């Protein structure tokens, strides 16, 4: 990765980082939104006032377009007065070094000696298969071959609208090593409820120690996945090799933890300070402090979802 401190010709004050437009430190950014009113001088003024309320100054309306009867769309430039201290930023990231397909196949062949069984599905009511296909299917995504292409992965794409209970049954009967779940629809936080439902079933079936659970989707983040009881979460722009790298590393970590077989990838890790903290947190039990802290943070964000009915789309579908 490039050194974040080496950002260009002008010296950047990383303690007071703000957007760059034309001159370093100008804070210029571009926003785009739609108002449910006809494009007009009044609509333009409303857009400017709303942008002022967001805290931007030096506002310029670059575009106002009519987007159908009763709607106007704006592209607006403004300068943001706020800054963030980049040196204090810590991110909870998936703990895995990125490796290519050939290297991962070689690691599995040499150090595991059997194919890892990976089941992928889009669960519940969700019928958006393109995301899970991008990860699983042979042809892959953005020039990165899918998991089906890996010689040492037995990757099976179960498709859309797979019930959590079915997925758990298959995980057991197929002796899966990893379960990949795609959630795209997020209306009423259905993705969170479905993900949590799967993990509570997995816990009841005693699957959470050895089986690797990975969630993905455009609104899925790694912290959200952890909060739902998963081991890792991947969002927009994920490539199959990101997921394969994680599965292989995590498999070897767990094998070391539970069977005492040394992890051959450990020496390569060379963790950064932040990554060490995260790895330690990840190693704690799912009921550990790190996870609890994280859960509290996310519960604030999704507090409403927690209070709502515990019914899931799985349940509803089963009743039909
Ligand atoms: C194509 C599409 C459909 C197709 C789906 C066809 C199919 N076979 O998948 C059809 C027409 C069926 C459809 C239906 C619906 N859709 Co639709 N659809 C889309 C659309 C246009 C594109 C989604 C897509 O394919 N993205 C491309 C893939 C590659 O991206 P991705 O899913 O993010 O995947 C990447 C990552 O997220 C990650 N990833 C994803 N899954 C996983 C899993 C794992 C394990 C990992 C590691 C990573 C990973 O890796 C992928 C590659 O990087 C989006 C809008 C949009 N532009 O995003 C709406 C959208 C998702 N749909 C939406 C809605 C509301 C619906 C409907 C409810 C509409 C309706 N009222 O009927 C229905 C739902 C049907 C159902 N039961 O689920 C909303 C969802 C809103 C929300 N957040 O809840 C969206 C966002 C449109 C919108 N703006 O309103 N849809």
Image (spheres, rainbow, N blue to C red):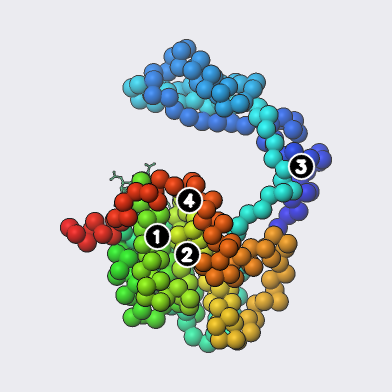
Q: In this view of the protein, which residue sits in the foreground, 199 or 71?
A: 199
Q: Quarter of the image holding residue 304?
A: top left
At x 49% / y 17%, what residue is drawn? Answer: 46
> Which comes sooner in the sequence, label 2 or label 3?
3
Which residue matches tag 3? 15
Query: Does dot 2 land on a helix, a strand or a loop?
Result: loop
Q: Is residue 54 at all visible to an observer of this figure?
A: yes
Image vertical order of residue 261 relative to residue 304, above or below: below
Whether label 2 touches label 3, CB < 8 Å: no
Residue 22 is tagged as: none
Q: Position of residue 158 (x, y in %)?
A: 34, 68
Q: Where, quadrant-wise, is the N terminus in this rendering?
A: bottom right
Q: Is residue 187 left or right of residue 289?
A: left
C-alpha gap between disc 4 and disc 2: 16 Å
At x 36% / y 58%, what residue is drawn? Answer: 194
Which residue matches tag 1? 195
At x 82% / y 40%, what residue is drawn? Answer: 11
Which residue matches tag 4? 299
Query: Does dot 3 land on a helix, a strand or a loop?
Result: helix
> Which comes sooner in the sequence, label 3 or label 4?
3
Query: Does dot 1 land on a helix, a strand or a loop?
Result: helix
C-alpha gap between disc 4 and disc 1: 15 Å
Disc 4 residue crowd, few under 14, some 14–19, many 20+, Cα 10 Å = some
């Amino acid at each position: 990765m490039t050194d974040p401190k080496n950002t260009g010709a002008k010296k950047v004050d990383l303690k007071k980082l703000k957007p760059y437009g034309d001159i370093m430190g100008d804070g210029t950014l571009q926003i785009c939104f739609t108002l449910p009113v006809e494009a007009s001088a009044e609509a333009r003024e409303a857009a400017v006032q709303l942008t002022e309320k967001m805290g931007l100054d030096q506002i310029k309306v670059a575009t106002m377009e009519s987007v159908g009867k009763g709607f106007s769309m704006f592209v607006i430039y403004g300068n943001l007065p706020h800054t963030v201290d980049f040196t204090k930023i810590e991110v909870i990231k998936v703990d895995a070094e990125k490796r290519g397909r050939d290297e991962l196949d070689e690691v599995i062949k040499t150090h595991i000696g059997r194919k890892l069984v990976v089941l992928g599905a889009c669960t519940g009511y969700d019928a958006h298969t393109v995301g899970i296909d991008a990860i699983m299917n042979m042809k892959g995504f953005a020039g990165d071959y899918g998991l089906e292409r890996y010689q040492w992965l037995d990757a099976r794409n179960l498709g859309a609208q797979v019930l959590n209970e079915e997925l758990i049954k298959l995980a057991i009967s197929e002796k899966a090593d990893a379960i990949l779940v795609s959630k795209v629809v997020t209306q009423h936080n259905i993705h969170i409820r479905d993900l949590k439902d799967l993990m509570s079933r997995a816990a009841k079936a005693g699957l959470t120690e050895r089986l690797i659970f990975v969630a993905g989707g455009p609104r899925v983040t790694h912290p959200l996945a952890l909060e739902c009881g998963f081991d890792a979460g991947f969002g927009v722009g994920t490539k199959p090799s990101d997921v394969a790298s994680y599965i292989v590393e995590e498999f070897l970590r767990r094998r070391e933890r539970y069977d005492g077989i040394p992890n051959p990838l450990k020496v390569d890790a060379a963790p950064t300070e932040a990554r060490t903290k995260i790895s330690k947190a990840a190693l704690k039990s799912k009921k550990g402090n790190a996870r609890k802290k994280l859960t509290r943070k996310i519960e604030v964000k999704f507090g409403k979802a927690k209070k709502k009915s515990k019914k899931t789309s799985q349940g509803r579908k089963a009743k039909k």
